[in-house]
Amino acid sequence: MNSTIENALYLIPSLLGETDAEQVLPSYNHDIVVQIKYFIVENVRSARRFLKKVDKDIDIGTLTFYELSEHTDVTQIGNYLDPLKNGSAMGVISEAGCPAVADPGAAVVAIAQKQNLRVIPLVGPSSIIMAVMGSGFNGQSFAFNGYLPVKPAERAQKLKQLESRVYKENQTQLFIETPYRNAKMIETILSALRPETKLCIAAGITCPEEYIHTRTVAQWKKTALPDLNKVPAIFLLYK
């Protein structure tokens, strides 16, 4: 072990699926993670599983976990950073990918910044950035829009708004959907948008089932669509 740990809040990227940690995480991350005893996590069970993938010899029983999910009352998380204030390094782990990006961890990072505590983001897989990289779309200007409305009519209206931004601002538009609704999302995209608009479907990034393809809406309509029922996916629009 040759990485010196600081008194800091480390933002630790997790895996995007069933992938070996060595495949996507730098060895530096391993050296830092095994020294941390306090973690703020989106889900304790999956965080423990991730830590065991990072190093099977980690003694989970010696670690302290603070849960911070979308259901957590953010007014109650002020004391989460007490170990950090008392001189101990802390780590933030999200369910998948990078903490604080489309993730509840942003709330505790905001507190750390407000209190002038050291924050260190570590390198790791970001499905948003990797989707832009693999799409062939504009990487100079892009916007991540999170989840779109669930109701079909509202979803179609939002898609048209995003498509308008593509053409007016020359900006790539990204969004996500709950995996079991991926098929419905694709169906709405193909029915609502212009034939010449380009759609990239980036699913299962870094995993064995990885699927990243870009086609126009017209081309997608003639293509056998992938089965993405249980696969996390990012959808990107461009001209």
Image (cartoon, rainbow, N blue to C red):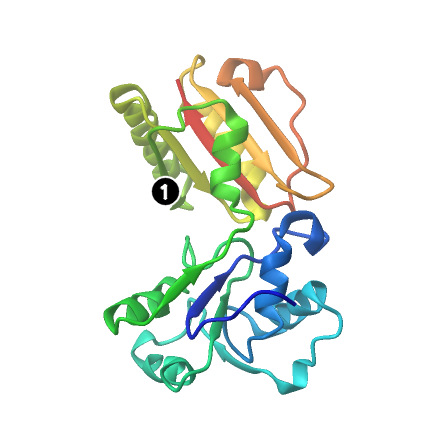
With respect to residue 209, does 97 lie above or below? below
Looking at the image, residue 179 sits to the left or right of residue 140; the answer is right
Q: Residue at x 57, y 65 (%)?
A: 3
Q: Residue at x 64, y 18 (%)?
A: 223
Q: Residue at x 59, y 46 (%)?
A: 232
Residue 44: quadrant of the picture: bottom right
Query: How packed is label 1: few (under 14 Cα within 10 Å), some, or many (20 or more)?
Result: few
Looking at the image, residue 69 sits to the left or right of residue 169; the answer is right
Image coordinates of residue 52 in percent, x first then y, are 70, 69
Foreground pick, 180 / 21: 21
Viewer can see residue 185: no
Which residue sits furthest front? 2
Image coordinates of residue 206 in percent, x first then y, are 65, 42
Q: Residue at x 41, y 53 (%)?
A: 102
Image coordinates of residue 238 in percent, x first then y, are 41, 22
Q: Amino acid at mark 1?
A: Asn
